Each structure stands twice: as C-alpha cells, then as structure tokens.
Amino acid sequence: MREKFQHFMTGRYGADDLSRVYIIATLVIFVISLISGWGILYWIGLALMIYAYWRMLSRNVSKRYEENQKYLNARYQVAVKWNGMKKRWAQRGTYRFYKCPQCRQMVRVPRGKGKICITCPKCRTEFIKKS
Ligand SMILES: [Zn+2]
C-alpha cells in the first residue's frame, strides 16, 4: 500500500506551504459553513479542497514550485511590513515617521523639534514637516 502510494506520487508535486494554506482555509470555511448554515460556503470549501489536492497531485512541478515561491515571497513582504509597523508603534513616543514624497522611503525624525527640513537619506529630496 505504502509502495503503491509512493509510486503514485513519483513525478507529482506533493505538499508545500501554499497547499497547507489551502487545506487550513478549507477547514476554516467548512467550520464557518457548519456554524452559519450557509450552504454556498460548503461548495466553496469543497472546490478549494479539490484545487488543493489537484495542486499536490500535479505533474507540472516547476509551475507549482513557482506558485509556492510567489506565496512565500508575499508572506515575507507582509512579515517585513508588519515588523516595521511594530517597530514604529514601539517608538511612536519619541519619533515621528514620514514617507519621502519622492521615493516613498520611510524617514524617522525625533519628536518635538518644531518645523524641520527633512532630507531623505535615500534620494536626498528635502521636505518640510512638523516633528
Ligand atoms: Zn526619498
């Protein structure tokens, strides 16, 4: 049985981070559909589950790998953004944060210095803000 399964899975993609997300989303949708009694959610969950298994059994490994890399990249971007927000929140008492109007770079300035001219460390654009 085990051998048969291994033979079946050779050349197929298998599970990855993205398929784990789909499975968890499926379970969440099923639970919500049970609680709320919305039949439509059951079918959405079922479709998502079928898609998740189709991905795992797919033979187009490079395409599936690419999808997973895209997901991991997006997850990384969110983590970076979240960490930045956490940091800014922790320093909100002593610093103010501004985005450079030219290049969108985040600039940190000390609070309580009145009107100051900020020079962007990245593109050297100068802009005036209240600190
Ligand atoms: Zn700039």
Image: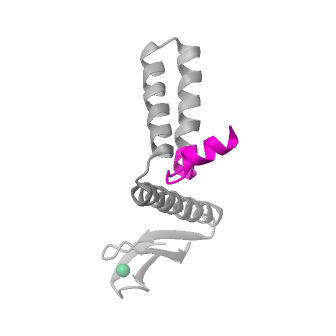
Closest to the observer: 107 or 81?
Answer: 81
Total numbered badges shown on the rendered structure: 0
Q: Residue furthest right?
A: 2
- 83 with respect to 52 (left or right): right
Where residue 125 appears, as percent x and y from the top left, is: 33, 84
Its colouring scheme is: one colour
Where residue 23 appears, as percent x and y from the top left, is: 56, 37
| Residue drawn at 33 percent across, 76 percent down | 103
| Residue drawn at 65 percent across, 63 percent down | 90
Where residue 82 appears, as percent x and y from the top left, is: 56, 58
Closest to the observer: 125 or 73?
Answer: 73
Closest to the observer: 54 or 78?
Answer: 54
Ligand 1 in which quarter: bottom left
Q: Residue furthest left?
A: 102
Give the magenta-colored segment's residue range. Answer: 1-20
**Within the magenta stretch, is there residue 18?**
yes
Q: Residue furthest top?
A: 37
- Compared with 3, 41 (above or below) is above
The quarter of the picture where residue 83 lies is bottom right
Where residue 72 appears, as percent x and y from the top left, is: 51, 59
- Compared with 1, 62 (above or below) is below
Q: Quadrant of the N terminus?
A: top right
**Within the magenta stretch, is there residue 40?**
no
- 81 with respect to 105 (left or right): right
- Compared with 4, 105 (above or below) is below
| Residue drawn at 59 percent across, 37 percent down | 24
The quarter of the picture where residue 61 lies is bottom left
Magenta span: predominant SS is helix
